[in-house]
Image (spheres, rainbow, N blue to C red):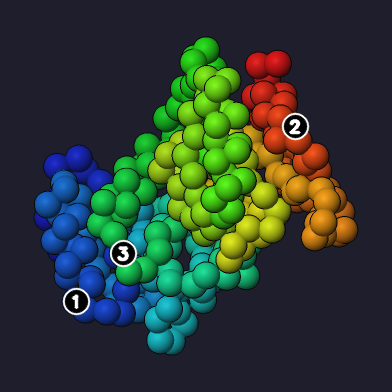
Amino acid sequence: MSAAAASNGQTILLVDDEEHLRVTLRDFLVFNGYGVELASSAEQALKQLEKGSYDLIILDISMPGMGGMGFLQRVAHNHIEAPPILVLTARTNLQQFFDGLDVAGFVSKPCEKGLLLAEIQRIMGAAQPIATAATAGESVHVLLGEDDTEMYGVIERLFTRHGHRVTRAVSGPGVLEAAPTTRPDVVVMKQFLTRLNGSAVATLLRTMPTTKTIPIVLYDTVGIGSHAPTAAVAASAPVDDYVAVHEPSQILDAVERVIGIL
C-alpha cells in the first residue's frame, strides 16, 4: 500500500473521479487515523481490489465509464470478494440504484464530513452487537419519518408522554440517512413520504447490514384523501406492522407491540 498504515490498522479505498474531493477526503480520513488508497474510476478500483486488501470502500455512484453502479454489479455478479461498500450519491431516487445490491450504507453528496466519519465508524463496528434501549429496559428511541409538521407534533407528543424519545426525518432519504447513524430501536414512517415512499425506504433498510434488523412500522391516515392501494402496497413491504390510522394512539400501540413492551 502506498498510503501510510493507519494507527488502527484499517485501510479505506476511496473511489471518486473528482480530484479535489479525493484529496480533501483523503486528508480528512488520514487525520482521523485511517489509511487511504485512492482510485479515480471504477475500473481502477477493480484492479486495486485484485492486488490490495481493504477494510472499506467509499464509492461515488456518478462517474464516467463503468461508474459506481457498474462497479457494484461487477462485484455482485462476478462474486468478487470485497469489503463493505459505503456509497456517495447525489441521487434522490435511491431504490433503483440500491435495491438488491450489497451496500453497507450511503452518504449524500455534497458530503458532510462529520456524517461521513460517523457512517465509517458505524460500518467498521457493524460486527459488534449493539444494546438497544428496548433490550436494556429504558425508553424506546423512535425514528419518525413524517413530513407534515402538525402530524409530527401530534405523534411526537404522544410518544414523549409515554416516555419514548423521538428523532424526526422529513423525507424518505432522510430516514435512510438517520437510521444507521442514530441507531433507533424502531423506525416509524408513513407510506406516502416526501421523495421516497415508506415501503421503498423499508426495502432499502432491509438491505443494509446495520439496519436490517430494526423493527419497522408503516402507517397511513384513513379518511379524506387517503390512498386506497396503500394496504396492498404495505402488505408486500418488509415491515413488522402496518397501521391504517384512525387515531394516533394506534401508531403507539403498533410500536410497543413490535418492540415487545405491551
| Residue in front for this viewpoint, 197 or 103 | 197
Q: In this view, does 181 lie to the left or right of 208?
A: left
For marks 2 and 3, the one nearer the N-term is: 3
Circle 3 packing at 10 Å, graded few (<14), some (14-19), many (20+), is some
Mark 3 and mark 1 residues within 8 Å of each other at the beta carbon: no
Residue where numbered disc 2 is placed: 250
Marks 3 and 1, Cα distance to the nearest angstrom?
A: 13 Å
Amino acid type shown at disc 3: Cys
Amino acid type shown at disc 2: Gln
Mark 2 and mark 3 residues within 8 Å of each other at the beta carbon: no
Residue where numbered disc 3 is placed: 111
**Disc marking residue 20:** 1
Q: Is 7 drawn above or below residue 249 in the view shown?
A: below
Image quadrant containing the C terminus: top right
Give x and y (percent) for residue 40.
29, 78
User: Residue sitting at 21 percent across and 63 percent down?
Assistant: 25
Mark 1 and mark 2 residues within 8 Å of each other at the beta carbon: no
